[in-house]
Amino acid sequence: WAAGGGVMHACGHDLHMAGLAAVGRAARTLELPVPLLALLQPREEGVDSGARDVVEEGGLRGVDAVVAAHVQPQLPAGVVAVTPGPVNASIDEFVVTVRGQGGHSGYPHTVTDSVLALSNVVVALQQLGARRVDPVVGIACMVNQLRAGTANNVVPDTATGSGTVRTMREDDRQRAHHAIRDIARHIAIAHGCTADVEIVPGEPPLVIDDHLATRALVLLEEMGHLVTADFRSFGSDDFATYGSHARTLMAFVGTGAEAGGLHDATFLPDDSYVGLVADALVAGYCAAVE
Amino acid sequence: WAAGGGVMHACGHDLHMAGLAAVGRAARTLELPVPLLALLQPREEGVDSGARDVVEEGGLRGVDAVVAAHVQPQLPAGVVAVTPGPVNASIDEFVVTVRGQGGHSGYPHTVTDSVLALSNVVVALQQLGARRVDPVVGIACMVNQLRAGTANNVVPDTATGSGTVRTMREDDRQRAHHAIRDIARHIAIAHGCTADVEIVPGEPPLVIDDHLATRALVLLEEMGHLVTADFRSFGSDDFATYGSHARTLMAFVGTGAEAGGLHDATFLPDDSYVGLVADALVAGYCAAVE
């Protein structure tokens, strides 16, 4: 099933395709109670993501439920996770630009230091996880890029930090956007500077339909598989986009860590996982039909 | 006196040269009690500074005192400052490299975040001014460059901050170096990271000889000039290098702010300052002879 040419995205996508092909072939031999549509999507991890294209081109017209299975090395080999509620996070990028009045590093009293202000902003943004969001769900807010200055002895006018904020719920997401702006701007002002905050929305949270999850879990158990309803991650997936248009189910198929992590060049799980992915998709279909 | 061709360093150096030439011409008509040597130095603000060349080439052999005058727009026009003790700061550059374990911004619990650690280091370095150095003398420690990361959603392995530390006394300087290393390393460890600190020594503090300052002040007063013994700045000057080999005096000749700041393209004080610079040099010579 693995793609030829030695080239891979290493996220298990060709394995997912193989599982879907298996389900499609089996379905052709059956009289299905409701139609089954195989959804092949471009740019699953691109910007803008391919899921938006699928929706905008009418790919979900008349569709009641969208079901997916994704391999997951964090789960033990053979365990399928079908968790109700949020299972993947929203992801939004933000850029904080702090502006001060730079100058001579020998005259600190004549400058307002954008670097010191930005550093305090980075530290203050940790309030999001510590005080702004219910910890039973949590949040991940990280500044992953810093840029400031061109000389060691010149205080720069501006300092920039950018990163990502991930939340599991839409209201936390809005709360986080507000808090990032509020914290950055006021911490900057407290240091005599100003801060502009730009937030670029990415994928929404991936929220699994309660009925689909609980029914699929029972069906997978009945098939004899090991199951859990307790796996979530702050990874993000554009599959979440479908959640605004249909009930969604994403099952995570455990491969164990031995096969390497996602996006790792060594990630090549055994052929047997094709069947497990197919079973997860079938369980989702059956849950949606009930 | 201004250099031709429209090109200038804009620090008043050609004005200083003109004042020195005036003193030299006047000296040739006199019977001086002790020899006077005109010191013309290359690379006053280069790295390594020209003052080191002058010392290493034996330019100060047999010299008891080195006297300079420097224009200073921060002082009112016509006021000459001759302050005993430290008048300019040492300057040393430092680079703090924080190393963590980067990774996926959706799995914050699996990384040790070099950006967060570095931001805390920048904030913690403010302890130098707040707690580590006697505020009657003070210190200036500023991180002026930040570099970290290449993507908004990837936690970087390393984050780098660099800047300058300026002190007025050698023992504060050594204390500051120790504190920068100590603070950066331990704050980094507190965040699960490590920090390497590199410190590149620059110019020493510029310390004016008490006798030269107090005598020159009286002599300038007697010449009818406005004087002060209360001007210091955390600027740095490689003239300080001579302080390890001879008594030093640097007088600051006020030009007022109207003429633009040092290194400003509009900085072109009036011809009359040539005479004032010459008088300051003469006062320094006379003070050294006494």
Image (tube, coloured by chain):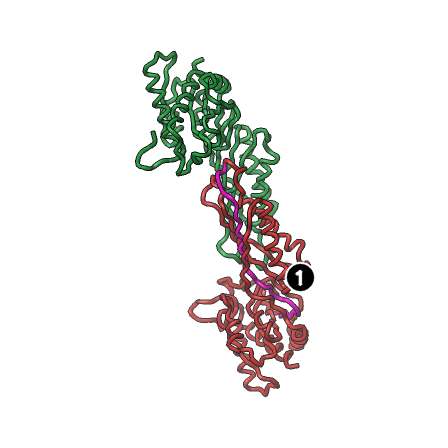
Chain colours: A green, B red
From which residue to which does the magenta span run? B79-105
Tell me: A54 left or right of B213: left
Which quarter of the picture shows residue B287? bottom right
Q: Chain of mark 1?
A: B
Q: Position of residue A86 (x, y in %)?
A: 51, 26
Q: Residue furthest bottom?
A: B31
Q: Nearer the viewer, residue B68 or B28?
A: B68
* Residue B217 appears in the figure: yes
How crowded pointer 1 is (Cα within 10 Å; few <14, some 14-19, many 20+) is rated as: few
Q: Is residue A40 above or below residue B84?
A: above
Q: Nearer the viewer, residue A238 or A189?
A: A238
Q: Is residue A288 above or below residue B68?
A: above
Q: Tell me what residue is drawn at x 44 percent, y 20 percent.
A: A246
Q: Tell me what residue is drawn at x 37 percent, y 13 percent.
A: A32
Q: Nearer the viewer, residue A180 or B78?
A: A180
Residue ID for mark 1 = B137
Q: Position of residue B253 (x, y in %)?
A: 59, 69
Q: Is residue B155 above or below residue A55?
A: below
Q: Considering the image in quadrants, where does the C terminus of chain B appear?
A: bottom right
Q: Tell me what residue is drawn at x 38 percent, y 35 percent.
A: A9
SS assignment at label 1: loop
Q: Position of residue A4 (x, y in %)?
A: 31, 34
